[in-house]
Amino acid sequence: MSGNNYQLVCGLEIHSELKTKSKMFCACKNDPFAAGKPNIHTCPVCLGMPGGLPLANKKAIEWTIKIGLALNCQINLFSKFDRKNYFYPDLPKGYQISQHDIPFCHDGFLDTSQGRVRIQRIHLEEDTAKLIHQNNYTLIDFNRSGVPLVEIVTETDIKNAQQAKEYAQKLRQILRYLDVADCDMEKGGMRLEANISLKKKTDPDGFLPNYKVECKNINSFRFMEMAINYEMERQAKLLDQGQTPKQETRGFSAESGKTFSQRAKEEAEDYRYFPDPDLPPIEFEPAEIAQIKQELVELPDQYAARLSEEHQLSLDLAQRLVKNKKRAEFFEQLLILAKREKIESKKIINTLLNKKIDYHLSDDPKNTIEEYKKLNELEEMSPEIITELIKELLQENQDVVEKYQSGKTEVLAFLIGQSMKKIAKKVDVNLVKKVLLDQLNN
Ligand code: ZN
Ligand code: MN
């Protein structure tokens, strides 16, 4: 038996911190990574002191809806915040303010090259404080406590590790295009979680296995890919032996490339959700949602499709130009200028992507076009033509040639200068010198 008998059943839960100016439920600065010291952006609300009253951050709510619209979601016009009760030192209130049964967004999708991934829900919650484990003790930094955190949950549509990676990368790209999150994976600004199980290939579509392994807090796309592949192998072995993999939470070790058991999760946890009595429900008018939709920027897939059509580029090539918004805007400006100058779009793009011209996204595309033109002239002037022109020049300057041949080699500089003038195009001076020497010395 082998893993080939099984089909991956996988959904992702991705948390991303929003980069609003202030935190989710208080006026403290939202700056968990650049804060000079621990525990400086804090107040009674985000420290979880009794009596602290939360006030919801409007911008964070609008951004969550914006994310939902970008991911083709339905938006709940009526929504609310709930308390998710659990005990852990990074959460001194004893509960996290989250959303339970009425998230802001639901039923969306994101298309990957391997098919559509349906999005079940997107909700908004607060991040917890950060625990820093040292030797025998643990430190707590509350700068992160109360930072707005969106959670984007997919259906179990992911068919392999590669697709999981593509989905997560596209999601990050969209969040960055929307300019609502930095998604710094290394610092924990974006955290990946994969729910992984296997079914038999003969099981029907939509069949859900009777167990699920959660791989949590993965901080790189590659690690997630590795974790899923490792789990597929591990679970297939167990299933082949007639066992059911344990329902548990597992971590991923980058050193070993393996997942490891963290805690058993035999029953669903009981968070005793209930509506937060300190926060009123949130209601939107359809016109307000329409307004947010109108403010949506052009997203990477649409951007690539448009560039491809307007500038006769293959979709693949166009996709490479829109990896981030700044890059897309640079290349679009460049393509518009190229069109005006009747430069072939595919040619100039390939020249740049092959790094034949040194360019930066902060450059003025006009200068890049000039660079391209120079390079092209350089290439258009063939060595044969250069040789012809230099032969002519030497014939016109027999006296100088004689001087050179009688040992006055310093006239070479003069001849190079004259050659460049005669060629009258920007050519490689070393090539000119070489041709000159060949002619003079034969
Ligand atoms: Zn605060
Ligand atoms: Mn969450």
Image (cartoon, rainbow, N blue to C red):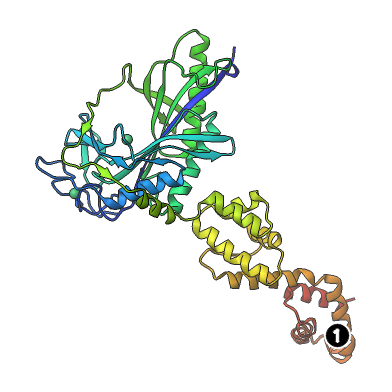
> Is residue 384 in view from this perspective?
yes
Pick the front one: 16 or 25 = 25
- What secondary structure is marked by label 1? helix
Image x and y of residue 313, in percent: 67, 55
Return the x and y of residue 212 as percentages of the image width and height.
Answer: 41, 21
Q: Which residue is mark 1?
A: 393
**Label 1 CB sits under 8 Å from any ligand 2 atom:** no
Say which of 437 and 59 sits in front: 59
Task: Please state which amino acid type lies under the numbered disc 1.
Answer: Leu
On the image, the x and y values in percent for residue 245 come to 43, 15
Q: Residue at x 60, y 64 (%)?
A: 358
Q: Is residue 153 above or below residue 188?
A: above
Q: Quadrant of the N terminus?
A: top right
Q: Residue furthest bottom?
A: 399
Instruction: Give whichever of 403, 297 is nearer the camera.
Output: 297
Question: Above or below — where is 251 with respect to 343?
Answer: above
Looking at the image, is 288 positioned above or below residue 408?
above
Packing grade of label 1 (10 A; few <14, some 14-19, many >=20) is: some
